[in-house]
Image: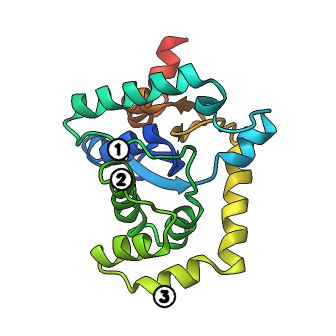
Amino acid sequence: MRRPSLDFYYEFSSPYSYLSAVRIGPLAEAAGVHVTWKPFLLGPIFAELGYSSSPFVDVPLKGEHMWRDVQRLAVHYGLPDVVRPDFFPLNTLLAARVALHLNDASRPGFTVAAFKALFAKGRDISDREVVRQVLAGLGHYCDHVIDAAETAENKAALKARVEEARAAGVFGAPTFITDDGELFWGNDRLEMAIAHAAAGGATAAKAS
């Protein structure tokens, strides 16, 4: 019997995506839900929505609250203190390309390791050497993977992923979409999304 599934759209510059990425695996496994990890870029979608940058930059007060909120949540989840980058939003294009290029089995491990490098260790994942070290720590042939991730074919695939996200109604990260098309936005909806997926949409039917 096919397991219920959940599409997990995440953006590497999103601290809330980090919080979801480090939690989603065990939670989904316990619920019997298969997760499809879908790295994408929010920049093109934000631009289409009229933002000049991240909403957390366009509204400074909102941005300050976001970093405080993320720090509180990290403590709540038992995670290391979140390192606030010097610049935000971040250039995470290389990490997104690498994550997309990797196969389904390797993508979650790389994603979690890259997020931890950025938000738990304060490393710059736009730096090829940092990404190479993340890959090496996972046992990959680093330069080969990075070179393949930067081919025209893979760049086009990432653009296609952005279009896929837009067509699915994604407007922020993290976003979770269940088999029945129900969209859940935000780290605080992770558990609800998994429960909905596991129930085969029954939670939505009861709510309506």
Classify mark 2: helix, strand or loop: loop
* Depth check, front residue: 189 or 73: 73
Label 3 Cα neighbours within 10 Å, binned few <14 / some 14-19 / many ≥20: few
Please tell me the numbered disc located at residue 170: none
Q: Which residue is mark 1?
A: 83
Coloring scheme used = rainbow
Q: Which residue is mark 2?
A: 122
Look at discs 1 and 3 and give the one toward the viewer: 1
Q: Image check: 64 left or right of 97?
A: left
For marks 1 and 3 on the same chain, the one whose residue lies earlier in the sequence: 1
| Left or right of 181 in this view: 159 | right
Q: Of all residues shown, which one is farthest toward the top?
A: 208
Identify the image quadrant of the C terminus: top right
- How far apart in space, not on screen, are marks 1 and 2 (Cα)? 5 Å
Callout 1 secondary element: loop
Circle count: 3
Amino acid type indicated by mark 3? His
Contact flag, marks 1 and 3 (Cβ < 8 Å): no
Looking at marks 1 and 2 on the same chain, the residue that comes earlier in the sequence is marked by 1
Q: Nearer the viewer, mark 3 or mark 2?
A: 2
Determine the residue positioned at 55% across, 19% down. 61
- Amino acid type shown at disc 1: Val
Residue at the spot 30% in from the left edge and 26% down from the top edge: 72
Q: Nearer the viewer, residue 70 or 27?
A: 70
154 displayed left or right of 193: right
Rendering coords of residue 158 (x, y %): 66, 63
Residue on which disc 3 sits: 144
Is residue 192 visible to the viewer in this orientation of the structure? no
Task: Measure how far apart labels 1 and 3 are at the Cα level.
Answer: 30 Å
Does residue 23 show up?
A: yes
View extreme (left): residue: 78
Q: Residue at x 51, y 79 (%)?
A: 146
